[in-house]
Amino acid sequence: MKRVILSFAVLLAVAGGAARADNAAARKACTDAMNADPKFAEEIVAATDAAKRDNADVEIAQLHQEAADKVARNEQHVILAYAAMWIAAAVFLGFLWKRQRALKDQIARLTADLEKALAEDQDSAKTS
């Protein structure tokens, strides 16, 4: 049993080393093939730039959508703020109207009291 395990371990070690050697050789062959084509680097740069532009367009669209969502969420606050301002203006105008009415009533009473006092003064001047 020990011999089987030991043999298996040796087989794995040899196969792993061969695989690494094959990977290194394949990598070198691929690198050489890429360097042999002068337009390869330009194509990679162009593809990368196109991918960046596509990502930028997606990011811009996402930012626009986030801004629209933010405005939509805040729209309710704006409507509530305008409603509060209209209510405050209506209450203020109601207060002014009530105050003006009270002042007109007070002026009317004072005018009536003044006329009454003048009439009494004239009556007392006639009698004396």
Image (cartoon, rainbow, N blue to C red):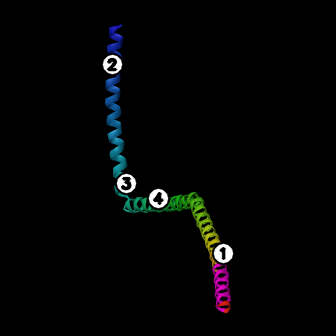
Q: Nearer the viewer, mark 1 or mark 3?
A: 1
Position of residue 37 measured from the top left corner of the image (x, y, whole percent): 38, 59
Amino acid type assigned to the residue bearing label 1 in the image: Arg
Disc 4 or 2, which lies upstream in sequence?
A: 2
How far apart, in angstroms, are the residues tagged by discs 1 and 2?
106 Å
User: As displayed, is residue 49 above or below residue 102?
Assistant: above
Type of secondary structure dominating the magenta stretch? helix
Q: Are marks 1 and 4 in contact (CB under 8 Å)?
A: no
Give neighbour class at mark 1: few <14, some 14-19, many 20+ (Cα, 10 Å).
few
The residue indicated by pointer 3 is 34
Residue 120 counted in the magenta span: yes
Amino acid type assigned to the residue bearing label 3 in the image: Met
Disc 2 or 3, which lies upstream in sequence?
A: 2
Residue 103 counted in the magenta span: no
Position of residue 16 measured from the top left corner of the image (x, y, whole percent): 34, 29
Q: Count of labels shown?
A: 4
Q: Quadrant of residue 42?
A: bottom left
Give neighbour class at mark 2: few <14, some 14-19, many 20+ (Cα, 10 Å).
few
Amino acid type assigned to the residue bearing label 2 in the image: Ala
